[in-house]
Image (spheres, rainbow, N blue to C red):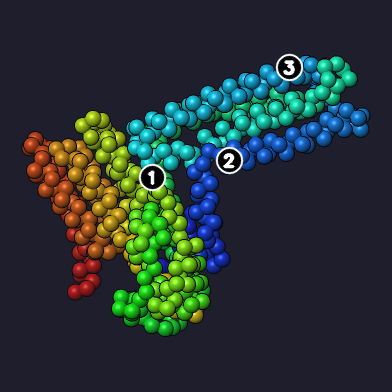
Amino acid sequence: MTDAKMDDLPRPRPAFGFVGRNGRHRLPSWRWEALRTTFWFVPGILVLLAGLLYVVTFEIDWAAYHHRITLPHWLVTSTAGAGREVIISLAAAVITVVGVVFSITIVALTLASQQFGPRMMRNFVRDVGNQVTLGIFVSTFVYSLLTLVSITGNSGTGFVPHLSISVSEALTLVDLAVLIYFIHHVSKSIQLPEVIAGIAGDLRRAIDYEFPRAASAAPGTGERQGKSLAELQSLLDSRGGTVEASRSGYLQFVGYAQLVDIAAQTDSVIRLEHRPGHFVVAGHRLATVWPRGAANQVAAALAKAHVTGPQRTLMQDPVFAIDQLVEIAIRALSPAVNDTFTALTCIDWLSAGVSRVSGRALAEGVFFDREGRIRLIEADPSYPRMVNRAFDKVRQAAGGMPAVILRMLTALTTIVEETTSSEQRRILLRQADAISRLAERTVTEPNDLADIRSSYRWLTTRMEAIEAPLASGLS
C-alpha cells in the first residue's frame, strides 16, 4: 500500500459511551455498557436518590417538630399511630407490586429466550424502561421504610414526619402511573416487529460509530514518517514477537488509543490478529509486535486495553446485530415455527443495515502516533463477511420458499443502489447467483420461478446500469 493510500485509511473510531481525548477510544465505554446490562445499576441509583430525598424531608420534618418552620395544614397527619398505619399500608402495597413487576419481567425474558433466541435476552435486560420501573418501585419501598422507622410514639406527643408521609403518598401515585406505563411497555416490547426494529436500530448505531462517513483527522496525520505499511507487514511476519491471549472468550472491546500510546512509548508496531466479536483461545496469538523485544511490555498493556467475555456485545461489533436478525429469521423459517412474515421483516431490516455499510469505508484500519508513524494495524473489517453473515444462513433455510427468495433478491437490489465500488457489487452478485441457483433447484411452481428469474434479471440490470458509466469513464 502506498503512502498516498495510507492517508485515506480510517482514523480511530469512537466507541459506544465515552470518547476520549482526540476522539480515540477510551476504556470506560465498555464499563458503561456492562453497567447498562444489569438489573441493579439503575435501581441502585434510584434507591440512593430516595435515601437523599428522605434525608431532606426528614430534616424539614424535624425542623417543623421543633417549631422552627410551619408546614401547611393539609400535610399534617393526626397522630403517630395514624401515620404509621398509612406507611405500613403503602409499603405493603408497593412491595407486592414489586413482586408483580419482577414476575412480569421474568416472564418477558422467558418468552424472549424461547421465541427470539437466548441472545435476545441481553436486549431486554439492558432495556432502560424495565430498569427504571423496577428502580422506582424499590426506591419507593425504601423511602417508605425509612419514614416508618422515623415515627416514634403512638400519641400526639411522638415525632410524626408529616412531610415524609405525604411524599410517600405522592410516590405511590407515581408508582401507579409507572405501573400502567410498564404494562404497556412490556406488551409492546415483546412484539416481534418492535424487537426486530430495536435490533436494527442497534445495528445502525453500531455502523455509525464504527464506520463514520467522515472520520476526523487524528494527531500526526500530516506528513507520514517511518516505514510503509507493506514494509511493516513484512517485518511483523518475519521478525515479529507473539502476544498470546491470557483467557478464552469473545473479544468485546479493544482500547485502540491505549495501544497506540504504548506502541509509541516502546517504539514498536502492533498488529491485532482479531477484531471485537471474534473468539480468542487462551495461549493462541492475540497480536504480533515488532520489534520482538517490546512484546512483553505490549502484552502487559494489551491485557489492560482489551476486554474478553463469555458473550459478544455491540460495542465494536456491528456483525453481532446482523447475527441477531439472522437468528430470528432462521427461527421463523424453521418447520416448527413457519412464520414467513417475520423472516421477511428481518430481511428488510438486514437490507437497511447492509445498505448503510455499503456507503462506508471498510479499509484496513491503520493508526498513527503524533509524529505520523504507523503504530497499530487492525484486523480487516471485511465487507464480504458482513454480506455473507446477513444472507448465507437465511438463504440456506429458504429452500422452496418463493416469497423469501424474492425478498432476498429485492433486498440485494436495494443494497446495490448504495454500493461504492465494483468489488462490493461483485460480492452482492455472488449472493444473487447463489439465491438464483437455490430457486432453480427447490421452487417447482413455474409462475413463482418466473417471478424469481425476473427479479434476478432486474438486479443484474441495475448492476450493469451502475457499472456502465464507470466502464465508459475508464475507456
Instruction: Name above or below for residue 398 compared with residue 268.
Output: above
Mark 2 = which residue? 42
Q: Quadrant of the C terminus?
A: bottom left
Q: How many angstroms separate mark 3 from mark 1 (CA)? A: 50 Å
Residue type at numbered disc 2: Val
Q: Position of residue 324 (x, y in %)?
A: 34, 44
Give the mark nearer the N terminus: 2 vs 3.
Answer: 2
Mark 3 = which residue? 85
Q: Is residue 402 visible?
A: no
Residue type at numbered disc 1: Ala
Local crowd size for mark 1, using a 10 Å CA cut-off: few (<14), some (14–19), many (≥20): many
Instruction: Name above or below for residue 311 compared with residue 47.
Output: below
Q: Residue at x 22, y 55 (%)?
A: 428
Tag 3 secondary structure: helix
Q: Quadrant of residue 236?
A: bottom left
Tag 1 secondary structure: helix
> Which one is nearer the viewer's eye here, 223 or 63?
63
Instruction: Name above or below for residue 271 compared with residue 427.
Output: below
Mark 1 = which residue? 200
In the rendered image, the residue lying farthest to the right is 67
> Which one is nearer the viewer's eye here, 315 or 106?
106
Q: Residue at x 21, y 63 (%)?
A: 467
Instruction: Name above or below for residue 114 compared with residue 203.
Output: above
